[in-house]
Image (cartoon, rainbow, N blue to C red):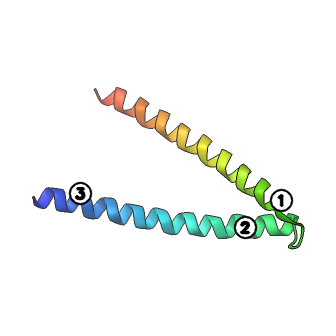
Amino acid sequence: MRGAYLTTMIALATAAFGLIAALAWNTAITDLIKTFLPAGKGLAPEFGYALVVTILAIVVINSLGKFADKDQSLIK
């Protein structure tokens, strides 16, 4: 029982730090985009930004998944 509790607490702490890191990156990227696309340019640049970030997230998550699969195959 204690092992399951510890595993859950570690997972929650990891998720919390991941969220904090994601929010920090969101702020940094948003500020970077604002230097190239000043406010008042309409919705198109914001949707473009959202699309680029989404594609980047998919590529990174996909790459991490492949890395994790490769790592698991090395362990067996």
Question: Which x, y percent locates residue 65?
Answer: 47, 38
Residue 6 at x, y percent in the picture = 20, 61
Q: Is residue 18 left or right of residue 33?
A: left
CA neighbours of label 1 inside 10 A, class few (<14), some (14 to 19), many (20+):
some
Q: Amino acid at mark 2?
A: Thr
Residue visible at 72% across and 67% down?
30
As displayed, is residue 69 above or below residue 16?
Answer: above
Report if the CB atoms under discs 3 and 1 are less than 8 Å apart: no
What residue sits right under mark 1 in the picture?
45
Q: Residue furthest bottom?
A: 39
Badge 3 is on which residue?
7
Residue at the disc numbered 2: 30
Residue 60: name its quadrant: top right
Q: Quadrant of residue 73?
A: top left
Q: Residue furthest front?
A: 43
* Residue lying at 66% horizontally and 70% vertically, measured from the top left: 27
x, y (%) of residue 16? 42, 67
Image quarter of residue 17: bottom left
Tell me which amino acid carries mark 1.
Pro
Left or right: where does residue 13 sit relative to residue 21?
Answer: left
Crowding near pointer 2: few (<14 within 10 Å), some, many (20+)?
some
Q: Position of residue 51 (x, y in %)?
A: 72, 50
> Does 27 sit left or right of 19 as displayed?
right
Task: Specify which label sits upstream in the sequence, 3 or 2.
Answer: 3
Q: Residue at x 23, y 57 (%)?
A: 7
| Residue 43, above or below 62 | below
